[in-house]
């Protein structure tokens, strides 16, 4: 089933503008995101294939089947609570039956986790971006050789430097295990192509071991920092995957304000924390943000990175205090939600377009 099918068959019972335009945080460049709810006709619902969600290719238009919608409400999912509480100016379609879904019976202390922890996850994401910008990883990938050290002159030096001092080529070297010494190898050298070299190729993830004839002189002890190499490989892969997938417009904006954090990401961090505090204190969801100017200052990069992290941590502590004192229930009224879903289906299936 596609979105066009939902519209053609008149199955949509709630459709709202979501995202920045619903929050009142849009700019002329903002896309229009749509979220909504549909009801599967009786024949489809009772058939073999239940369809919980329908979206377009870019996922900026998403409709949830009413059963999935109620299920997500029972978890106090932020996106779904925002959809239910969309401001009137953001509502495109709302069936009268949907007015029966009372947000006041749904809000609970779960919002501390669903809104608050999601906000802190955004901070973690911002920290990760900050690290990537401040500590870029060179495109030229390091090899195992870069993570090897040689015992030398009462200390140690990089293997590459040792080979340079000796005027030796790594392909003429041979390594053997040293018993009872993890990742430590004896180094031998011969220009007669007797050995397998230190590594098989630049892409090798292991050192190469050779068979050394008896009586050959051991030239040095080599230590391979295997853990350091593994950590580097992980960091390299993550960094260049991020480069490949990053939103270039947002990245250029990050560079333009010079603060080394994703300003839009940080703006939504504070929006989520504010909403969590409001829910715990006032027991309602305010989708349209009253502090647009303050949030836009964050988006425009007017604060230092550390300053924002400190402010976010203080807001998180405030949120913890609010929920400790809040009269909200620990969890939503699941029995009421279940009964509401049943009654909604009965009502909708009594209407012509949903009965087929």
Image (tube, grey):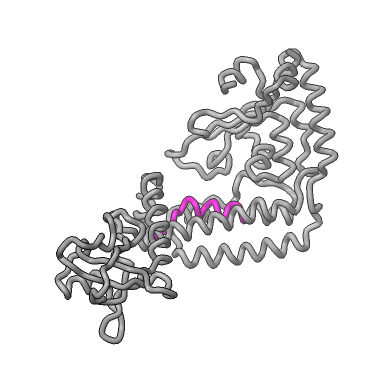
Q: Is residue 152 above or below residue 159?
A: below
* Front-most of residues 288 and 310: 310
Query: Going 65% across and 37% down the picture, which residue do you hit?
Result: 83
Q: Name the residue furthest front.
A: 214
Query: Going 47% across and 67% down the picture, which residue do you hit?
Result: 306
Tell me, yes or no, if residue 320 can be seen here: yes
Question: Residue 312 appears at what percent x and percent y?
Answer: 57, 62
Say whether residue 135 is left or right of residue 100.
Answer: left
Where, quadrant-wise, is the N terminus in this rendering? top right
Tell me, yes or no, if residue 259 can be seen here: no
Name the magenta segment's main secondary structure: helix
Question: Residue 25 appears at what percent x and percent y?
Answer: 52, 45
In which image quadrant can residue 41 be found?
A: top right
* Front-most of residues 233 and 73: 233
Where, quadrant-wise, is the C terminus in this rendering? top right
Say whether residue 185 is left or right of residue 5.
Answer: left
Query: Going 64% across and 55% down the picture, which residue do you hit?
Result: 116
Query: Going 72% across and 47% down the picture, which residue do you hit?
Result: 284
Instruction: Report the label total.
Output: 0
Tell me the magenta residue range. 259-273
Residue 18 sits inside the magenta stretch: no
In which image quadrant can residue 166 be found?
A: bottom left
Question: Residue 300 appears at what percent x and percent y?
Answer: 43, 54
In which image quadrant can residue 144 be found?
A: bottom left
* Front-most of residues 208 and 215: 215
Question: Residue 96 appears at what percent x and percent y?
Answer: 75, 26
């Amino acid at each position: 089933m596609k979105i066009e099918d939902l519209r053609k068959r008149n199955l949509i019972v709630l459709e709202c503008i979501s995202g920045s335009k619903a929050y009142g945080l849009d700019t002329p460049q903002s896309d229009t995101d749509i979220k909504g709810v549909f009801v599967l006709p009786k024949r489809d619902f009772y058939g073999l294939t239940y369809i919980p969600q329908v979206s377009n290719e870019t996922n900026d238009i998403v409709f949830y089947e009413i059963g999935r919608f109620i299920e997500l409400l029972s978890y106090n999912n932020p996106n779904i609570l925002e959809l239910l509480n969309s401001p009137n100016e953001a509502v495109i379609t709302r069936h009268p039956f949907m007015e029966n879904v009372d947000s006041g019976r749904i809000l609970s202390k779960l919002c501390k986790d669903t809104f608050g922890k999601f906000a802190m996850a955004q901070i973690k994401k911002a920290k990760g971006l900050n690290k990537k910008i401040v500590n870029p990883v060179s495109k030229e990938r390091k090899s195992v050789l870069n993570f090897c050290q040689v015992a030398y002159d009462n200390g140690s030096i990089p293997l590459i430097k040792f080979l340079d001092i000796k005027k030796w080529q790594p392909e003429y070297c041979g390594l053997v295990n040293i018993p009872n010494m993890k990742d430590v190898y004896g180094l031998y050298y011969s220009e007669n192509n007797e050995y397998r070299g230190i590594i098989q190729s630049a892409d090798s993830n292991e050192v190469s071991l050779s068979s050394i004839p008896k009586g050959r002189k051991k030239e040095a002890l080599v230590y391979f920092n295997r853990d350091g190499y593994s950590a580097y490989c992980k960091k390299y892969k993550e960094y260049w995957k991020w480069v490949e997938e990053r939103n270039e417009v947002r990245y250029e904006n990050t560079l333009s304000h010079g603060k080394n954090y994703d300003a839009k990401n940080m703006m939504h961090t504070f929006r989520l924390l504010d909403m969590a505090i409001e829910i715990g204190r006032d027991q309602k969801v305010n989708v349209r943000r009253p502090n647009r100017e303050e949030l836009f200052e964050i988006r425009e990069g007017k604060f230092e990175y550390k300053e924002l992290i400190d402010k976010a941590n203080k807001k998180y502590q405030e949120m913890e205090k609010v929920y400790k004192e809040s009269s909200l229930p620990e969890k939503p009224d699941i029995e009421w939600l279940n009964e509401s879903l049943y009654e909604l289906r009965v009502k909708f299936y009594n209407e012509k377009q949903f009965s087929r």
